[in-house]
Image (cartoon, rainbow, N blue to C red):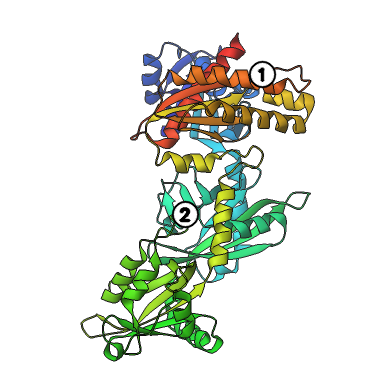
Amino acid sequence: MRIIDIFIDKNVNSFQIDEDLQLKGTSKNLHEVMMKSEKLKSFDDVVKELFLSDTFSNEKYYISIKNKIKDVFKEKNTSLDQVIVSNDLDKDTAYSFSIGLDYVKCDNCFVYVRIANFKILNTRNVIYDNVMDDYEDSFEIFELSSNIGKFIIDFNITKHNVYATDEFAKLLSIPVRQDKTYLLTRHADKFQGDNVLIREHGFFRRTDMLISGELEELTDEWFFNGKWLKVDVKVLKRFPNGLAEYIGGVIYDISELRQQEEFMYTHKIYEFAIQSGQIGVFFYDVDKYGPGYFDANDIYANLLGLERQENGYFDSKDFEKSLLGIESEIQDKGHVKDKMNELLSGEIEGTDNHVLKVKNLKSNKEYYMLSSSRIEERYENGEPRKIGGIIIDITERILNEKHQIEFANKDELTGLSNNRKLHKDMQKRKPGIGLFFDLDNFKKFNDTYGHSAGDQVLYEFSQALREASLPFNNVYVYRLYGDEFFVFAEGYASNFPPQFEQILYSLLEQRMKQYDYNLPLKASMGYAEFKTSTDIDDFIKEADYEMYKIKLHKRNK
């Protein structure tokens, strides 16, 4: 176990130090670690390990703590401090602890050093916690409820990283994370992993409006694990250019309120639909129409191209004929036929905002419909007696969203698929090999020739990657972040990377001849093998790590 682990794990750790700063004794837990270590033989060794290591360094405090001990010997007094020590290697982290120094007078005088409540802090998290402590003054819900989750998004970091309280995770029924960070990304309502919260595009579009200043606050309602949650979000601070720097929000359970409003809402929407004639309405009444038949208004019948039967009603089988399979990126709630069977059998109470893809049985044109339904009345045995519902034509909206999904999967500068598309594609890829590229000295290139030239270099490198992939089958190219790129070669092994790299640099050399840059354009490459059982994130990280070793080797030459 490392010294840092001992300090974090144990509440109090202590030393006895003589006037020459020599170690005369330690607490039991420290003694055991130091006895097993070859490099931890003195108090100075321990202090260096804490404050002058390759992961945490603050030379000023390393000198300061020894000077304080000398002062205690000189003044023969006691000192007690609560300390936060910053990390010069990582400005976002710090140590927090209390340190007590007691002069003990005896034949061989010594200073008793106690270090307690040792913690590693993320300084940004301290800021976030302070901001969220003031939410009671910003959100009225605190006057009505106590079970409220708080969160904050810092656009200095990324708009997809959510810092949140434990109540936030508990309300969403996801594991509470010690680092209190959760990933917010674009898709349908579901979770992946223990820190990923995925939301649909509408929420992100309105978030973008918050960022730009078109909105100052927004409200959304999320349905998870059988309960309704309401989210209130506000801009907390803006950059000088008007864009949002921080947005904060609260989340709370509104399931009971929704249940109270549900009945009135359903009947109001039916009444509105009939009066306005803009919404298709359907209704099952087993006693009146018989099993397998239903009634509907003309809007509904015309949208699906249905004809009334001899009994004056519509046949459920014709409705089933009109149904088409829907794209997974639009909806993953299960097949409509299955949901309809569950509704007719009484297994579920209804469906909310279910997207249908249908073919008009007369024109053969395809449409997208938004459908909601409810069981209005049951028999004594629980089986449905009356079921009502509505449909709305949302074809134009869905086609726009499909275009947005396609756009969301592309990197704007290079035209390559992006990191989001890589993770999605890897879920269906067969074994192969992944190549992680990172441009060498890209920052120096940017600083020397400017960001426009930097963008041009990124574009040329991306096109060289694309051209290098053309001679091969099943080779896919992605831009991750900044100057990081990824190539996945499905079905290839470790002999592929050097072959691909040779072709790439030949193409790149030809492309860069048109520019008058004195700095050569090169990249470091690492690769990792992918198997169907491999975790996608671990696979990408492994390739990244191999790339980093290559880059480090170049720097040390």
Residue drawn where x is 49% and y is 34% of the image: 116
The vertical placement of 257 against 43, above or below, is below
501 or 15, which lies in front? 501
Answer with left or right where residue 463 lies relative to residue 548.
right
Disc 2 marks which residue?
Answer: 329
227 or 284, which lies in front? 284
**What residue occupies the far top of the structure in this picture?**
557
The secondary structure type at the circle numbered 2 is loop
Pointer 1 local density, CA inside 10 Å: few below 14, some 14–19, many at least 20: some
Q: How far apart are the two marked residues, 2 and 1, measured between alpha carbons?
A: 40 Å
The secondary structure type at the circle numbered 1 is helix
**Picture quarter with the N terminus:** top left
The residue type indicated by label 1 comes to Glu
Residue 521 percent location from the top left of the image: 67, 20
**Picture quarter with the C terminus:** top right
Label drawn at residue 509: 1
Dividing the picture into quadrants, the one containing residue 390 is bottom left
The vertical placement of 219 against 177, above or below, is below
Residue 552 seen: yes
Answer with left or right where residue 281 lies relative to residue 154.
left
Residue 355 percent location from the top left of the image: 45, 66
Residue 202 seen: no
259 or 38, which lies in front? 259
The residue type indicated by label 2 comes to Glu
Answer with left or right where residue 199 lies relative to residue 513.
left
First in residue order: circle 2 vs circle 1: 2
The vertical placement of 518 against 120, above or below, is above
Residue drawn where x is 28% and y is 86% of the image: 286
